[in-house]
Amino acid sequence: MNTLNRRQFLKLGGAASLLAALPKAVGAATTPARVVVVGGGFGGATVAKYLRMWGGNVSVILVDPNPSHLSCILSNMVVVGTLGMSRITISYDSLKARHGVNVVQGKAVGIDPAGNRLTISTSSGNKTLDYDHLVLSPGIDFAPAPGVWDPSLTPHAWQAGAQTTLLKNQLAAMRNYDKFVMTVPKSPYRCPPGPYERACVVADYLKRKGYYGAKVIVLDANAGIQAEPEAFSHAFNVTHKGMIEYHTSATVQSIDSKTRSIATSALNVSNAKVLNYIPNQVAGGITAGLPHNATGFVPVDPLTYAVQGYGNIHVIGDACAVPSSEGKAVPKSGHMANSEAKVCADAIVRTLAGGTPDENVTTNSACYSPITNKSASWLSANFNYGDIYNSKGEVIGKGMHRVDLGEAPAERVNGDSYQDMYTWAEALFSDSFM
Amino acid sequence: MKTLSFPMRPLTGGLLIAVAALAGTAHAEPGRLLAAQCAQCHGTNGAGPGFDSIAGKNAGELYHELVEMKYRPIESIMDRQARGYTEDQLLQISNYLSTLPGGGDD
Protein backbone atom coordinates (compact mmCIF):
# COMPACT_ATOMS: atom_id res chain seq x y z
CA MET A 1 0.00 0.00 0.00
CA ASN A 2 1.69 3.17 -1.19
CA THR A 3 -0.75 5.73 0.02
CA LEU A 4 -4.16 5.57 1.51
CA ASN A 5 -6.22 7.86 -0.66
CA ARG A 6 -9.39 9.59 0.37
CA ARG A 7 -11.59 6.98 -1.29
CA GLN A 8 -9.88 4.14 0.51
CA PHE A 9 -10.05 6.09 3.73
CA LEU A 10 -13.78 6.50 3.31
CA LYS A 11 -14.18 2.81 2.49
CA LEU A 12 -12.32 1.91 5.61
CA GLY A 13 -14.79 4.05 7.43
CA GLY A 14 -12.93 5.77 10.22
CA ALA A 15 -9.87 6.52 12.21
CA ALA A 16 -9.93 3.28 14.16
CA SER A 17 -9.73 1.24 10.99
CA LEU A 18 -7.04 3.47 9.54
CA LEU A 19 -4.85 2.86 12.56
CA ALA A 20 -5.63 -0.84 12.37
CA ALA A 21 -5.08 -1.31 8.68
CA LEU A 22 -2.08 0.92 8.05
CA PRO A 23 0.69 -0.83 10.00
CA LYS A 24 -0.50 -4.23 8.80
CA ALA A 25 -0.55 -3.18 5.17
CA VAL A 26 2.96 -1.76 5.46
CA GLY A 27 4.31 -4.92 7.00
CA ALA A 28 2.11 -7.29 5.00
CA ALA A 29 5.00 -9.20 3.47
CA THR A 30 6.25 -10.54 6.79
CA THR A 31 3.65 -10.23 9.54
CA PRO A 32 0.40 -12.08 8.96
CA ALA A 33 -2.70 -9.94 9.36
CA ARG A 34 -4.89 -11.15 12.17
CA VAL A 35 -8.59 -11.75 11.60
CA VAL A 36 -10.78 -12.93 14.44
CA VAL A 37 -14.18 -14.42 13.57
CA VAL A 38 -16.93 -14.74 16.18
CA GLY A 39 -19.50 -17.47 15.53
CA GLY A 40 -18.94 -20.77 13.74
CA GLY A 41 -22.19 -21.05 11.83
CA PHE A 42 -22.57 -20.79 8.07
CA GLY A 43 -21.38 -17.18 7.97
CA GLY A 44 -18.44 -17.47 10.34
CA ALA A 45 -17.16 -20.79 9.00
CA THR A 46 -17.34 -19.53 5.41
CA VAL A 47 -15.56 -16.25 6.09
CA ALA A 48 -12.81 -18.11 7.99
CA LYS A 49 -12.36 -20.66 5.20
CA TYR A 50 -12.36 -18.15 2.34
CA LEU A 51 -10.03 -15.75 4.14
CA ARG A 52 -7.53 -18.61 4.36
CA MET A 53 -8.18 -19.65 0.73
CA TRP A 54 -7.92 -16.15 -0.69
CA GLY A 55 -5.94 -14.21 1.86
CA GLY A 56 -2.43 -15.56 1.50
CA ASN A 57 -0.61 -14.74 4.70
CA VAL A 58 -3.62 -14.17 6.97
CA SER A 59 -4.01 -15.66 10.43
CA VAL A 60 -7.62 -16.57 11.21
CA ILE A 61 -9.04 -17.42 14.63
CA LEU A 62 -12.63 -18.68 14.78
CA VAL A 63 -14.35 -18.47 18.16
CA ASP A 64 -17.48 -20.51 18.95
CA PRO A 65 -18.89 -21.82 22.24
CA ASN A 66 -19.60 -25.26 20.74
CA PRO A 67 -17.12 -27.97 19.69
CA SER A 68 -19.03 -28.46 16.41
CA HIS A 69 -21.80 -26.65 14.59
CA LEU A 70 -25.42 -27.73 14.87
CA SER A 71 -27.20 -26.72 11.70
CA CYS A 72 -30.67 -25.22 11.69
CA ILE A 73 -30.81 -26.24 8.03
CA LEU A 74 -32.51 -29.68 7.87
CA SER A 75 -33.30 -29.48 11.60
CA ASN A 76 -37.05 -29.68 10.96
CA MET A 77 -36.38 -33.12 9.50
CA VAL A 78 -34.76 -34.05 12.81
CA VAL A 79 -37.81 -32.77 14.73
CA VAL A 80 -40.06 -35.17 12.80
CA GLY A 81 -37.60 -38.06 13.12
CA THR A 82 -36.66 -38.38 9.45
CA LEU A 83 -33.01 -37.49 10.15
CA GLY A 84 -30.82 -38.00 13.19
CA MET A 85 -28.88 -35.28 15.04
CA SER A 86 -25.65 -36.54 13.48
CA ARG A 87 -26.90 -35.34 10.10
CA ILE A 88 -26.98 -31.71 11.28
CA THR A 89 -23.80 -31.88 13.37
CA ILE A 90 -20.91 -30.40 11.40
CA SER A 91 -17.30 -30.76 12.51
CA TYR A 92 -14.75 -27.95 12.48
CA ASP A 93 -11.98 -30.46 11.68
CA SER A 94 -11.72 -29.49 8.00
CA LEU A 95 -11.48 -25.80 8.83
CA LYS A 96 -8.58 -26.65 11.12
CA ALA A 97 -6.76 -29.32 9.12
CA ARG A 98 -7.43 -28.33 5.50
CA HIS A 99 -7.63 -24.58 5.87
CA GLY A 100 -5.43 -23.78 8.84
CA VAL A 101 -8.13 -21.96 10.79
CA ASN A 102 -7.40 -21.74 14.50
CA VAL A 103 -10.73 -22.79 16.04
CA VAL A 104 -11.05 -21.76 19.68
CA GLN A 105 -13.89 -22.97 21.86
CA GLY A 106 -15.11 -20.00 23.82
CA LYS A 107 -17.71 -17.30 24.03
CA ALA A 108 -17.03 -13.75 22.90
CA VAL A 109 -17.87 -11.47 25.82
CA GLY A 110 -16.50 -8.03 24.97
CA ILE A 111 -15.08 -5.89 22.19
CA ASP A 112 -12.59 -3.08 22.67
CA PRO A 113 -12.86 -1.29 19.30
CA ALA A 114 -10.21 1.33 20.11
CA GLY A 115 -7.74 -1.34 21.21
CA ASN A 116 -8.67 -3.77 18.42
CA ARG A 117 -9.09 -6.46 21.00
CA LEU A 118 -11.75 -9.12 21.69
CA THR A 119 -12.28 -10.75 25.08
CA ILE A 120 -13.47 -14.33 25.12
CA SER A 121 -14.53 -16.57 27.97
CA THR A 122 -13.14 -20.11 27.82
CA SER A 123 -13.05 -23.14 30.10
CA SER A 124 -9.64 -21.92 31.28
CA GLY A 125 -10.76 -18.36 31.98
CA ASN A 126 -10.96 -15.13 30.03
CA LYS A 127 -8.53 -14.47 27.18
CA THR A 128 -7.96 -11.53 24.87
CA LEU A 129 -7.42 -11.76 21.12
CA ASP A 130 -5.86 -8.88 19.16
CA TYR A 131 -7.20 -8.36 15.68
CA ASP A 132 -6.68 -6.28 12.57
CA HIS A 133 -10.19 -7.18 11.41
CA LEU A 134 -13.00 -8.59 13.52
CA VAL A 135 -15.86 -10.42 11.81
CA LEU A 136 -18.97 -11.00 13.88
CA SER A 137 -21.32 -13.75 12.72
CA PRO A 138 -23.18 -14.38 15.97
CA GLY A 139 -26.59 -15.16 14.52
CA ILE A 140 -29.71 -14.23 16.43
CA ASP A 141 -30.76 -13.59 19.97
CA PHE A 142 -34.37 -13.62 21.09
CA ALA A 143 -36.31 -10.50 21.97
CA PRO A 144 -37.82 -10.58 25.48
CA ALA A 145 -40.99 -12.68 25.64
CA PRO A 146 -44.18 -11.18 27.05
CA GLY A 147 -45.25 -13.28 30.01
CA VAL A 148 -43.36 -16.19 31.53
CA TRP A 149 -41.44 -18.14 28.93
CA ASP A 150 -39.30 -21.13 29.84
CA PRO A 151 -37.71 -22.61 26.70
CA SER A 152 -37.05 -25.88 28.54
CA LEU A 153 -40.84 -26.34 28.74
CA THR A 154 -41.98 -24.67 25.52
CA PRO A 155 -39.03 -24.82 23.11
CA HIS A 156 -38.22 -22.48 20.25
CA ALA A 157 -35.96 -24.97 18.41
CA TRP A 158 -34.80 -21.97 16.35
CA GLN A 159 -31.20 -22.56 17.35
CA ALA A 160 -30.36 -26.19 16.75
CA GLY A 161 -29.15 -28.62 19.40
CA ALA A 162 -30.83 -29.58 22.67
CA GLN A 163 -33.85 -27.50 21.67
CA THR A 164 -34.26 -29.58 18.50
CA THR A 165 -34.24 -32.80 20.53
CA LEU A 166 -36.68 -31.37 23.06
CA LEU A 167 -39.20 -30.40 20.39
CA LYS A 168 -38.75 -33.78 18.70
CA ASN A 169 -39.52 -35.59 21.96
CA GLN A 170 -42.54 -33.41 22.67
CA LEU A 171 -43.88 -34.05 19.17
CA ALA A 172 -43.31 -37.79 19.61
CA ALA A 173 -45.53 -37.68 22.73
CA MET A 174 -48.52 -36.31 20.79
CA ARG A 175 -51.60 -38.51 20.32
CA ASN A 176 -55.21 -38.24 19.06
CA TYR A 177 -56.77 -34.75 19.39
CA ASP A 178 -53.53 -33.15 20.63
CA LYS A 179 -52.65 -29.66 19.41
CA PHE A 180 -49.22 -28.48 18.23
CA VAL A 181 -49.24 -24.69 18.57
CA MET A 182 -46.47 -22.61 17.04
CA THR A 183 -45.71 -18.96 16.46
CA VAL A 184 -44.18 -17.23 13.46
CA PRO A 185 -42.07 -14.27 14.62
CA LYS A 186 -42.47 -10.76 13.30
CA SER A 187 -40.21 -10.21 10.27
CA PRO A 188 -37.27 -9.91 9.97
CA TYR A 189 -36.37 -13.26 11.50
CA ARG A 190 -34.01 -16.17 10.73
CA CYS A 191 -35.09 -18.31 7.76
CA PRO A 192 -38.30 -16.78 6.33
CA PRO A 193 -39.74 -20.12 5.04
CA GLY A 194 -38.67 -22.05 8.17
CA PRO A 195 -41.79 -21.74 10.34
CA TYR A 196 -44.13 -22.67 7.47
CA GLU A 197 -41.89 -25.59 6.60
CA ARG A 198 -42.07 -26.74 10.22
CA ALA A 199 -45.88 -26.50 10.21
CA CYS A 200 -45.96 -28.64 7.07
CA VAL A 201 -43.62 -31.40 8.19
CA VAL A 202 -45.23 -31.60 11.64
CA ALA A 203 -48.70 -31.88 10.02
CA ASP A 204 -47.30 -34.52 7.68
CA TYR A 205 -45.85 -36.43 10.62
CA LEU A 206 -49.14 -36.36 12.56
CA LYS A 207 -51.03 -37.52 9.48
CA ARG A 208 -48.61 -40.38 8.87
CA LYS A 209 -49.01 -41.42 12.51
CA GLY A 210 -52.78 -41.41 12.01
CA TYR A 211 -53.57 -39.34 15.09
CA TYR A 212 -57.24 -38.51 14.84
CA GLY A 213 -58.10 -34.86 15.41
CA ALA A 214 -54.47 -33.86 15.95
CA LYS A 215 -53.72 -30.46 14.52
CA VAL A 216 -51.09 -27.75 13.96
CA ILE A 217 -52.14 -24.22 14.91
CA VAL A 218 -49.92 -21.53 13.38
CA LEU A 219 -50.00 -18.08 14.97
CA ASP A 220 -48.28 -15.72 12.54
CA ALA A 221 -47.31 -12.27 13.83
CA ASN A 222 -47.20 -11.09 10.22
CA ALA A 223 -50.05 -10.19 7.87
CA GLY A 224 -49.38 -13.20 5.67
CA ILE A 225 -46.97 -15.95 4.66
CA GLN A 226 -43.45 -14.49 4.49
CA ALA A 227 -41.86 -16.81 1.93
CA GLU A 228 -43.00 -19.10 -0.88
CA PRO A 229 -46.62 -17.93 -0.47
CA GLU A 230 -47.95 -20.11 -3.30
CA ALA A 231 -46.30 -23.32 -2.15
CA PHE A 232 -47.24 -22.88 1.49
CA SER A 233 -50.80 -21.67 0.77
CA HIS A 234 -51.29 -24.78 -1.32
CA ALA A 235 -49.72 -26.93 1.38
CA PHE A 236 -51.92 -25.42 4.12
CA ASN A 237 -55.15 -25.47 2.10
CA VAL A 238 -54.78 -28.61 0.01
CA THR A 239 -51.90 -30.94 0.90
CA HIS A 240 -52.45 -30.64 4.65
CA LYS A 241 -56.12 -29.61 4.52
CA GLY A 242 -57.75 -29.93 7.91
CA MET A 243 -54.40 -30.46 9.65
CA ILE A 244 -53.13 -26.87 9.75
CA GLU A 245 -55.05 -23.93 11.16
CA TYR A 246 -53.37 -20.69 10.07
CA HIS A 247 -53.95 -17.33 11.81
CA THR A 248 -52.43 -14.05 10.60
CA SER A 249 -51.60 -10.83 12.48
CA ALA A 250 -51.32 -12.84 15.69
CA THR A 251 -49.15 -10.60 17.86
CA VAL A 252 -48.13 -12.47 20.98
CA GLN A 253 -49.47 -10.71 24.09
CA SER A 254 -48.47 -13.21 26.74
CA ILE A 255 -47.15 -16.69 27.12
CA ASP A 256 -47.24 -19.07 30.06
CA SER A 257 -44.90 -22.01 29.60
CA LYS A 258 -46.18 -23.92 32.64
CA THR A 259 -49.72 -24.22 31.27
CA ARG A 260 -48.53 -24.17 27.63
CA SER A 261 -50.89 -21.27 27.00
CA ILE A 262 -50.50 -18.30 24.72
CA ALA A 263 -52.55 -15.16 24.15
CA THR A 264 -52.32 -13.33 20.83
CA SER A 265 -54.23 -10.55 19.10
CA ALA A 266 -55.81 -13.20 16.84
CA LEU A 267 -56.39 -16.22 19.08
CA ASN A 268 -55.81 -17.50 22.59
CA VAL A 269 -54.85 -21.13 23.16
CA SER A 270 -54.67 -22.87 26.53
CA ASN A 271 -53.13 -26.22 27.36
CA ALA A 272 -51.55 -26.96 24.01
CA LYS A 273 -49.89 -30.37 23.95
CA VAL A 274 -46.85 -28.72 22.39
CA LEU A 275 -46.24 -24.97 22.42
CA ASN A 276 -43.44 -24.16 20.01
CA TYR A 277 -42.89 -20.49 20.76
CA ILE A 278 -40.51 -18.95 18.21
CA PRO A 279 -39.85 -15.46 19.57
CA ASN A 280 -39.11 -12.24 17.71
CA GLN A 281 -35.41 -11.89 16.97
CA VAL A 282 -32.53 -9.43 17.19
CA ALA A 283 -28.80 -9.50 16.44
CA GLY A 284 -26.62 -11.71 18.64
CA GLY A 285 -25.63 -10.15 21.98
CA ILE A 286 -21.95 -9.57 21.19
CA THR A 287 -23.09 -6.74 18.87
CA ALA A 288 -24.58 -4.85 21.84
CA GLY A 289 -22.09 -1.96 21.71
CA LEU A 290 -22.58 -1.40 17.97
CA PRO A 291 -25.31 0.65 16.29
CA HIS A 292 -28.60 -1.17 15.67
CA ASN A 293 -31.58 -0.34 13.48
CA ALA A 294 -35.19 -0.16 14.69
CA THR A 295 -35.66 -3.93 14.38
CA GLY A 296 -32.52 -4.76 16.36
CA PHE A 297 -30.00 -5.62 13.64
CA VAL A 298 -26.67 -3.99 12.75
CA PRO A 299 -26.57 -1.87 9.58
CA VAL A 300 -23.51 -2.64 7.44
CA ASP A 301 -21.75 -1.46 4.29
CA PRO A 302 -22.91 -3.85 1.52
CA LEU A 303 -19.42 -4.02 -0.04
CA THR A 304 -17.43 -4.81 3.11
CA TYR A 305 -20.01 -5.67 5.79
CA ALA A 306 -18.18 -3.13 7.96
CA VAL A 307 -20.20 -1.39 10.63
CA GLN A 308 -20.50 2.34 10.08
CA GLY A 309 -17.86 4.12 12.14
CA TYR A 310 -16.00 0.85 12.83
CA GLY A 311 -14.21 0.11 9.56
CA ASN A 312 -12.45 -3.03 10.78
CA ILE A 313 -15.46 -4.55 12.57
CA HIS A 314 -17.70 -6.49 10.20
CA VAL A 315 -21.07 -8.11 10.83
CA ILE A 316 -22.39 -10.82 8.49
CA GLY A 317 -25.30 -13.24 8.41
CA ASP A 318 -28.49 -13.09 10.43
CA ALA A 319 -27.17 -10.32 12.73
CA CYS A 320 -26.60 -7.71 10.01
CA ALA A 321 -28.98 -5.41 8.18
CA VAL A 322 -27.94 -4.89 4.56
CA PRO A 323 -29.22 -1.72 2.86
CA SER A 324 -31.80 -2.89 0.33
CA SER A 325 -34.80 -1.69 -1.62
CA GLU A 326 -37.98 -1.17 0.36
CA GLY A 327 -39.99 -4.37 0.63
CA LYS A 328 -37.12 -6.38 -0.84
CA ALA A 329 -35.04 -7.16 2.23
CA VAL A 330 -32.05 -9.47 2.15
CA PRO A 331 -33.26 -12.65 3.89
CA LYS A 332 -31.58 -14.06 6.98
CA SER A 333 -30.48 -17.59 6.10
CA GLY A 334 -27.46 -19.87 6.27
CA HIS A 335 -27.16 -19.74 2.51
CA MET A 336 -27.18 -15.93 2.52
CA ALA A 337 -24.69 -15.84 5.41
CA ASN A 338 -22.32 -17.96 3.31
CA SER A 339 -22.86 -15.57 0.39
CA GLU A 340 -22.17 -12.46 2.48
CA ALA A 341 -19.13 -14.11 4.07
CA LYS A 342 -17.43 -14.37 0.67
CA VAL A 343 -18.05 -10.70 -0.09
CA CYS A 344 -16.69 -9.80 3.34
CA ALA A 345 -13.63 -12.07 2.98
CA ASP A 346 -12.83 -10.65 -0.47
CA ALA A 347 -13.15 -7.06 0.83
CA ILE A 348 -10.86 -7.77 3.80
CA VAL A 349 -8.25 -9.42 1.56
CA ARG A 350 -8.33 -6.48 -0.85
CA THR A 351 -8.14 -3.95 1.99
CA LEU A 352 -5.19 -5.73 3.59
CA ALA A 353 -3.42 -5.69 0.22
CA GLY A 354 -3.93 -1.93 0.01
CA GLY A 355 -6.78 -2.07 -2.48
CA THR A 356 -10.43 -1.11 -2.41
CA PRO A 357 -13.47 -3.41 -2.22
CA ASP A 358 -14.92 -4.81 -5.43
CA GLU A 359 -18.16 -3.13 -6.49
CA ASN A 360 -19.17 -5.93 -8.87
CA VAL A 361 -20.84 -7.79 -6.05
CA THR A 362 -23.79 -10.17 -5.95
CA THR A 363 -25.34 -12.25 -3.20
CA ASN A 364 -27.95 -14.96 -3.38
CA SER A 365 -30.08 -17.28 -1.37
CA ALA A 366 -31.52 -20.55 -2.51
CA CYS A 367 -33.16 -23.15 -0.38
CA TYR A 368 -35.43 -26.16 -0.39
CA SER A 369 -38.34 -26.54 2.01
CA PRO A 370 -39.90 -29.94 2.67
CA ILE A 371 -43.70 -29.96 2.40
CA THR A 372 -44.01 -33.66 3.31
CA ASN A 373 -41.45 -36.40 3.86
CA LYS A 374 -41.46 -37.00 0.11
CA SER A 375 -41.83 -33.58 -1.50
CA ALA A 376 -40.22 -30.16 -1.27
CA SER A 377 -40.52 -26.67 -2.66
CA TRP A 378 -37.71 -24.22 -3.40
CA LEU A 379 -36.98 -20.54 -3.12
CA SER A 380 -34.46 -18.43 -5.01
CA ALA A 381 -33.41 -14.80 -4.45
CA ASN A 382 -30.64 -12.73 -6.02
CA PHE A 383 -29.18 -9.38 -5.08
CA ASN A 384 -26.86 -7.09 -7.03
CA TYR A 385 -24.94 -4.11 -5.70
CA GLY A 386 -26.21 -0.78 -7.02
CA ASP A 387 -29.02 1.70 -6.56
CA ILE A 388 -31.73 0.78 -4.10
CA TYR A 389 -35.26 2.15 -4.17
CA ASN A 390 -38.18 3.11 -1.97
CA SER A 391 -41.72 1.92 -2.69
CA LYS A 392 -42.25 4.83 -5.11
CA GLY A 393 -39.30 3.74 -7.20
CA GLU A 394 -37.09 6.63 -6.10
CA VAL A 395 -33.40 5.97 -5.51
CA ILE A 396 -32.61 6.06 -1.79
CA GLY A 397 -28.94 5.09 -1.90
CA LYS A 398 -26.61 2.23 -2.67
CA GLY A 399 -27.10 -1.28 -1.45
CA MET A 400 -28.04 -4.80 -2.46
CA HIS A 401 -31.00 -4.52 -4.81
CA ARG A 402 -33.09 -7.65 -5.24
CA VAL A 403 -33.01 -8.40 -8.96
CA ASP A 404 -34.87 -11.70 -8.86
CA LEU A 405 -37.12 -13.63 -6.51
CA GLY A 406 -39.13 -16.74 -7.13
CA GLU A 407 -40.38 -20.03 -5.81
CA ALA A 408 -40.83 -23.42 -7.38
CA PRO A 409 -43.68 -23.61 -9.91
CA ALA A 410 -46.48 -25.83 -8.52
CA GLU A 411 -45.48 -28.84 -10.63
CA ARG A 412 -41.97 -28.61 -9.19
CA VAL A 413 -43.12 -29.08 -5.61
CA ASN A 414 -42.33 -32.76 -5.86
CA GLY A 415 -40.06 -35.67 -5.07
CA ASP A 416 -37.26 -34.44 -7.32
CA SER A 417 -37.08 -31.22 -5.33
CA TYR A 418 -37.09 -33.30 -2.14
CA GLN A 419 -34.01 -35.16 -3.35
CA ASP A 420 -32.47 -31.87 -4.50
CA MET A 421 -32.90 -30.58 -0.95
CA TYR A 422 -30.31 -33.07 0.28
CA THR A 423 -27.94 -32.28 -2.59
CA TRP A 424 -28.26 -28.57 -1.81
CA ALA A 425 -27.66 -29.09 1.91
CA GLU A 426 -24.62 -31.28 1.27
CA ALA A 427 -23.15 -28.65 -1.07
CA LEU A 428 -23.82 -25.80 1.33
CA PHE A 429 -22.46 -27.68 4.36
CA SER A 430 -19.36 -28.57 2.37
CA ASP A 431 -18.74 -25.12 0.89
CA SER A 432 -19.08 -23.55 4.33
CA PHE A 433 -17.26 -26.02 6.58
CA MET A 434 -15.14 -28.47 4.55
CA MET B 1 -24.66 -27.29 -26.68
CA LYS B 2 -21.89 -28.82 -28.75
CA THR B 3 -23.10 -27.04 -31.88
CA LEU B 4 -22.66 -23.61 -30.31
CA SER B 5 -18.94 -23.64 -29.82
CA PHE B 6 -18.32 -19.90 -30.19
CA PRO B 7 -19.13 -17.54 -27.36
CA MET B 8 -21.27 -14.50 -28.03
CA ARG B 9 -18.44 -12.26 -26.97
CA PRO B 10 -14.67 -12.64 -27.09
CA LEU B 11 -13.36 -14.45 -24.04
CA THR B 12 -10.81 -11.96 -22.90
CA GLY B 13 -8.37 -12.53 -20.13
CA GLY B 14 -8.66 -16.30 -19.82
CA LEU B 15 -4.94 -16.91 -20.00
CA LEU B 16 -4.13 -14.12 -17.58
CA ILE B 17 -6.66 -15.49 -15.14
CA ALA B 18 -5.12 -18.93 -15.33
CA VAL B 19 -1.65 -17.51 -14.65
CA ALA B 20 -2.88 -15.53 -11.68
CA ALA B 21 -4.63 -18.60 -10.27
CA LEU B 22 -1.50 -20.70 -10.57
CA ALA B 23 0.58 -18.01 -8.89
CA GLY B 24 -1.58 -18.51 -5.79
CA THR B 25 -1.30 -14.91 -4.69
CA ALA B 26 -3.76 -13.00 -2.59
CA HIS B 27 -4.57 -10.97 -5.69
CA ALA B 28 -8.21 -11.40 -6.62
CA GLU B 29 -8.76 -12.60 -10.17
CA PRO B 30 -11.71 -11.12 -12.07
CA GLY B 31 -14.81 -13.26 -11.68
CA ARG B 32 -13.57 -15.07 -8.58
CA LEU B 33 -15.95 -13.43 -6.14
CA LEU B 34 -18.90 -13.69 -8.54
CA ALA B 35 -18.15 -17.36 -9.24
CA ALA B 36 -17.79 -18.09 -5.53
CA GLN B 37 -21.53 -17.41 -5.31
CA CYS B 38 -22.12 -20.62 -7.32
CA ALA B 39 -20.31 -22.71 -4.70
CA GLN B 40 -23.18 -22.89 -2.20
CA CYS B 41 -24.84 -25.39 -4.57
CA HIS B 42 -21.96 -26.57 -6.78
CA GLY B 43 -19.20 -26.94 -4.21
CA THR B 44 -16.14 -24.83 -3.47
CA ASN B 45 -14.46 -23.79 -6.73
CA GLY B 46 -17.38 -25.43 -8.55
CA ALA B 47 -15.95 -28.88 -7.90
CA GLY B 48 -18.70 -30.41 -5.76
CA PRO B 49 -20.11 -32.01 -3.79
CA GLY B 50 -23.44 -30.71 -5.00
CA PHE B 51 -25.29 -30.18 -8.25
CA ASP B 52 -23.54 -30.37 -11.66
CA SER B 53 -19.80 -29.93 -11.42
CA ILE B 54 -18.97 -26.66 -13.16
CA ALA B 55 -15.22 -26.42 -12.57
CA GLY B 56 -13.16 -26.46 -15.74
CA LYS B 57 -16.17 -26.37 -18.03
CA ASN B 58 -15.79 -24.93 -21.50
CA ALA B 59 -16.26 -21.18 -21.02
CA GLY B 60 -18.30 -20.66 -24.16
CA GLU B 61 -20.65 -23.55 -23.47
CA LEU B 62 -21.18 -22.51 -19.90
CA TYR B 63 -21.87 -18.92 -20.88
CA HIS B 64 -24.40 -20.01 -23.49
CA GLU B 65 -26.15 -22.31 -21.05
CA LEU B 66 -26.37 -19.56 -18.43
CA VAL B 67 -27.70 -17.01 -20.91
CA GLU B 68 -30.26 -19.54 -22.14
CA MET B 69 -31.38 -20.15 -18.55
CA LYS B 70 -31.58 -16.41 -17.91
CA TYR B 71 -34.14 -15.84 -20.66
CA ARG B 72 -36.13 -19.06 -21.00
CA PRO B 73 -39.38 -19.65 -19.08
CA ILE B 74 -38.83 -20.74 -15.47
CA GLU B 75 -38.52 -24.48 -14.99
CA SER B 76 -35.64 -25.10 -12.65
CA ILE B 77 -34.06 -23.14 -9.84
CA MET B 78 -31.12 -22.32 -12.13
CA ASP B 79 -33.48 -20.44 -14.47
CA ARG B 80 -34.14 -18.16 -11.52
CA GLN B 81 -30.54 -17.92 -10.36
CA ALA B 82 -29.32 -17.01 -13.87
CA ARG B 83 -31.74 -14.08 -13.85
CA GLY B 84 -29.82 -12.69 -10.89
CA TYR B 85 -26.80 -11.75 -13.01
CA THR B 86 -26.13 -9.46 -15.95
CA GLU B 87 -24.82 -11.06 -19.13
CA ASP B 88 -21.45 -9.52 -18.40
CA GLN B 89 -21.42 -11.09 -14.93
CA LEU B 90 -22.37 -14.47 -16.43
CA LEU B 91 -19.47 -14.08 -18.87
CA GLN B 92 -17.02 -13.33 -16.06
CA ILE B 93 -18.30 -16.30 -14.08
CA SER B 94 -17.98 -18.62 -17.10
CA ASN B 95 -14.47 -17.38 -17.84
CA TYR B 96 -13.33 -17.84 -14.27
CA LEU B 97 -14.87 -21.31 -13.79
CA SER B 98 -13.27 -22.51 -17.04
CA THR B 99 -9.83 -21.85 -15.55
CA LEU B 100 -10.41 -24.04 -12.50
CA PRO B 101 -9.23 -27.64 -12.27
CA GLY B 102 -12.00 -30.01 -13.37
CA GLY B 103 -13.71 -31.28 -16.47
CA GLY B 104 -17.26 -30.13 -15.93
CA ASP B 105 -20.05 -32.66 -15.89
CA ASP B 106 -20.76 -33.25 -19.55
Image (tube, rainbow, N blue to C red):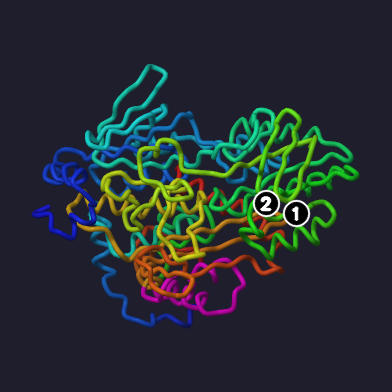
In magenta stretch: residue A317: no
Which span is picked out in magenta? B59-88
Give the CA distance from mark 1 to mark 2. Answer: 8 Å
Q: Disc number at residue B82?
A: none
* Chain for numbered disc 1: A
Residue picked out by circle 1 = A246
Residue reaching furthest to the top: A124
Q: Position of residue A98 (x, y in %)?
A: 38, 39
Q: For numbered disc 1, what is the local secondary structure?
A: strand
Dividing the picture into quarters, in which one does residue A290 lie? top left
> Earlier along the polypeptide chain: callout 1 or callout 2?
2
Q: Is residue B25 visible?
A: no
* Chain for numbered disc 2: A
Q: In the figure, is residue A194 to the left or right of B13?
A: right
**How would you rate the neighbour count of disc 1 (Cα within 10 Å): few for under 14, some for 14-19, many for 20 or more?**
some
Q: For numbered disc 2, what is the local secondary structure?
A: strand
Q: How many marks?
A: 2
Q: Is residue A71 visible?
A: yes
Q: Tell me which residue sits at (39%, 31%) in the image.
A: A108
Q: In the figure, is residue A378 to the left or right of B29?
A: right
Q: Position of residue A366 (x, y in %)?
A: 54, 59
Up/down of A353 relative to A61, above or below:
below
Quadrant placement of the C terminus of chain A: top left
